[in-house]
Amino acid sequence: MNDEQRLPLWRQLQAVTQVLHAIRQGQSGTAALAEVAPALRPGVQALSFEVLRSLGRAQALRKLLASRNPPPAVDALLCTALALLWRPQNASYDAFTLVNQTVECAKRTPALKAQASFVNACLRRFLRERELLVAQTDTDPVARWNHPAWWIKQLQSDWPDQWQDILAAADQHAPMVLRVNARLGTPAQYLEKLSEVGIPASLIGAYGVLLANACAVQHLPGFEQGWVSVQDSAAQLAAPMLLSGLAPVDGLRVLDACAAPGGKTAHLLELSQAQVTALDVDPLRCERIHQTLARLGLQAQVLAADAADVSAWWDGTPFDAILLDAPCSAAGIVRRHPDIRWLRRQTDIAQLAAIQARLLQKLWPLVKPGGRLLYCTCSVFRQEGAQQVAAFLANHSQVTMLSSPGHLLPHGDLQGATPADNLIGDHDGFYYALLEKQAA
């Protein structure tokens, strides 16, 4: 029995409630989980993700059970319990245990103790009236799809034929995909190594391996020796797309403009002998790039700088290729980070689009004639993808858009309609546009 299984459930629920409360206050899920005691963290993360994927439904049910808003901490505990209770066929624990342990959590938490009877009454009523209460919330889009109303409306506008698949995929568990280091072997060879240690997997894409079940990286053969990295199959397209067709591949000057944590920087180096400059505005995130490259035995020039503040870091020599993985809403990776949907505000999208446009405007002059820039975001919103690039093309004459995937919509294992250029398989949401600078 592992540590989290020995710990009482009420302690895990206490930590999950604190995580949810922190997210509602604007803290990222990653930061909130980092504050959880290590012994509790694995179980708390699993339960927190489950809660966040059903939070819309839980909030709607809580409103039916308590017409007046309870204190934030009480509301977070109730929503945590309701998110875990409402769908018994998928529940991690039986209803009796969940209710019992939720009430125990309230009794043992000073800020919640006075409300323990109220929590118990709400949850007991829910168990008695579950079918009726759930049916009442079925007509609420936020409860039905577990995303904010503005997010749902934006997807309906952007993707009128695919929006339901995108939302449903966001509530699935993301697969664990590995990128095989091309300097050290092939995916087929690594598949054999996984088979030798009893880890089932299959090939995906040109450089990827899809694990049948996620596992800790320390259990992967050769991970510390740099044989593989964890990277979604959609993200694995960036480096080969940017490098393909450029000659010579060796000795190219390449910029990774928003590089942390360094996965795409590393892939560029695994596939070429390019001189890579990796930028990130945050010095702490630059340290992540250094760590990534050190594990893989690779080297790049890593600079802590604002990519848009060109005069502060550029040496004046144009680049053959620039990878601009621009800051974005991260709406395409919400299945991996389910807190994102509840943290983002509708106004964030326009603000992020303005940052993206500024980066494109500032970095385009750094591309030499005949060179190229790959613009990408891990977003499914058109404002951060197709619309952003359309505006750029309308204002720049010496640019050609080369063949590139455009929007890649996440659909998991769902059999819904997807764009013709979408990848076949399970991948995150992404956007790619490959732009070539024409000679003057």
Image (tube, grey):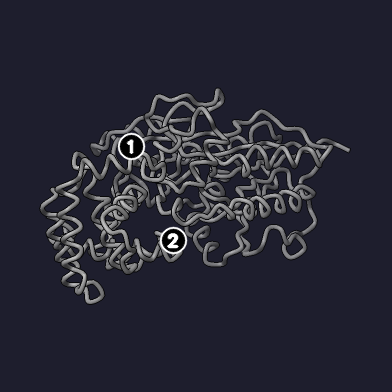
Question: What residue is shown at x 73% (from left), y 43% (from top)?
Answer: 320
In this view of the protein, which residue sits in the foreground, 199 or 95? Answer: 95
Residue 63 disc label: none
Q: Note whether residue 42 is visible.
A: no
Please determine whether, in this image, residue 436 is positioned above or below residue 277. above
Q: Residue furthest front?
A: 67
Rendered location of residue 267, percent (x, y): 53, 44
Q: Which quadrant would the C terminus be assigned to in this image?
A: top right
SS for callout 2: loop
Please give the count of numbered marks on the rendered protein: 2
- Is residue 374 shown left or right of residue 15? right
Please determine whether, in this image, residue 319 is positioned above or below residue 138. below
Q: Note whether residue 303 is visible.
A: yes
Amino acid beneath label 2 = Ser
Q: Residue furthest right?
A: 440
Rendered location of residue 410, percent (x, y): 46, 35
Q: Which quadrant would the N terminus be assigned to in this image?
A: bottom left
SS for callout 1: strand
Query: In this figure, which residue is indicated by the disc labeled 1?
Result: 211
Question: What residue is shown at x 58% (from left), y 55% (from top)?
Answer: 348
Q: Residues within 10 Å of mark 2 (few under 14, many from 20)?
A: some
Instruction: Report the Cα–Cα distance between label 1 and label 2.
Output: 27 Å
In this view of the protein, which residue sits in the foreground, 347 or 176? Answer: 347
Rendered location of residue 155, percent (x, y): 52, 38
Please determine whether, in this image, residue 416 is positioned above or below residue 220. above
Residue 28 disc label: 2
